[in-house]
Image (tube, helix red, strand yellow):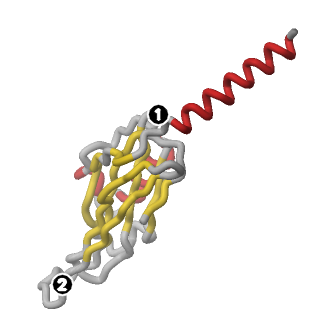
Amino acid sequence: MKKVVLIAIGLVAMLSCETEQTELQQGPVEVVNLASGILDGAGEENIPKQNIVIGDRATWNALLSQMNSVNNETDNFVETEVDFESFLVLASFDEVKETGGFDIQILEATQNSSDLSVVILETQPAEGDIVPMVVTQPYNIVKILRTYTPIIFE
């Protein structure tokens, strides 16, 4: 009798997991901007060009600390207290640039059947633009509702 009950419980659990996956809401995902700007520590923050997904407070605090290692960059953030049970943080850092005029933005996120697609836009000054002669590193940090599907940056 115990085996039958355990098998029944297992089947119900498997069916509910399959139902959750097929009921995955596809389409645009709300992207909430937390911070966008440039690190101006001439690369001393030691943050490489990267796109990262942060799903826990320890990793988030480590990134904030690294960003603040030269200047108090997070003073300009809209929010630094993130509920990681409900949200994920997506951060996009460009490479260190020798001049100003560069930008990076997380434009949109779209939930597909098998993954979440995140579109990144990198812009640079047009030829002939007058730009500040200062070393910069563009970044953009957003939060989205937590998802358990793979996140693909494009």
Residue at image point 36% right, 71% down: 94
Does the image show residue 5? yes
* Numbered circle sitting on residue 85: 1
Q: Which of 3 and 90 is in front in this view?
A: 3
User: Which callout, 1 or 2, points at the residue further toward the start of the chain?
Assistant: 1
* Numbered circle sitting on residue 15: none
Dot 1, how many residues are within 10 Å of its Cα: few (below 14), some (14-19), or many (20+)? Answer: few
Q: Where is residue 144 in the image (x, y as percent from the top left)?
A: 37, 44
Q: Is residue 143 left or right of residue 77?
A: right
Residue type indicated by callout 2: Ala
For residue 105, what is the image quadrant? bottom left
Residue at image point 61% right, 32% down: 17
Residue at image point 29% right, 43% down: 79
Give the spatial CA distance, label 1 vs label 2. Answer: 42 Å
Does the image show residue 39? no
Element at label 2: loop
Residue at image point 37% right, 53% down: 109
Q: Specify the quadrant that holds the N terminus.
A: top right
* Numbered circle sitting on residue 126: 2
Q: Specify the quadrant that holds the C terminus.
A: bottom left
In the current view of this chain or complex, which residue is farthest to the bottom? 128
Residue type indicated by callout 1: Glu
Identify whether 111 is placed above or below 9: below
Q: Where is residue 86 in the image (x, y as percent from the top left)?
A: 43, 34
